[in-house]
Amino acid sequence: MIKSLRTKEGIRLLRDNYIGRLAFISQGNPYVVPITYYYDETSNSILGYSAEGHKMNAMRENRSVSLEVDEISSVNNWRSILAHGVFEELQGSEAKFLLHRFAQGVKNIILRKEKIIPQSISEFSSKLNSPKTPIVFRIRIVEITGKQRKP
């Protein structure tokens, strides 16, 4: 049976994971790309970072974005949420502080879910291998919707 998730359940799914699919619009076309993210409970927002490029340019142009996160065990047992929000590029000390929060948060989720202790952020995200400084961003959540199916 398929049922809607309450906002609280959607936040729990968002909080307990670190890989999602970011949806954005570029030149009138929808794009969906996988990203590593961290849900920041203190600001009810999604933290991420990226190298300069198509995705960042598109989100600067159209700040309305969504993040899809799911847990799928089988065709009859899954949960999925869509967090709609507004992109915000961060800079300076705030960006540095939130990048640290992102790294610590993702490390904790990996430890809890996978029983692995990553030593550095580069173990779960490739962007730090880029010679350029990563761009830190936040998605301020406006709405969370979700569905689940259980046997």
Image (tube, rainbow, N blue to C red):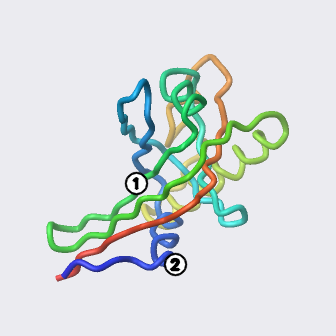
Please tell me whether residue 68 is drawn above or below residue 61 in the rendered image: below
- Seen as rendered, the residue at the extreme front is 28
Q: Residues within 10 Å of mark 2 (few under 14, many from 20)?
A: few
| Residue bearing mark 1 | 68
Measured as percent of width and height from the top left, residue 36 is found at 49, 45
| Residue 93 image position (x, y, % from top left) | 85, 39
Q: CB atoms at circles 1 and 2 under 8 Å apart?
A: no
In the displayed structure image, the side of residue 113 where residue 62 appears, left or right: right
In the rendered image, residue 128, in percent from the top left (x then y), is placed at 59, 29
From this view, report whether residue 126 is shown above or below residue 23.
above
Q: Earlier in the sequence, mark 1 or mark 2?
A: 2
Using a 10 Å C-alpha cutoff, classify the residue at mark 1 as few (fewer than 14 neighbours), some (14 to 19) or many (20 or more). Answer: many
Question: Residue 3 appears at what percent x and percent y?
Answer: 28, 80
- Decide which of 65, 47 is in the foreground and name it: 65
| Residue at x 49% of width, y 66% of height | 16
Q: Amino acid at mark 1?
A: Glu
Question: Which quadrant, please, contains the C terminus?
Answer: bottom left
What residue lies at 64% left-to-right and 46% top-to-bottom? Answer: 138
Left or right of 5 in this view: 89? right
- Which residue is at 17% across, 67% downward? 74
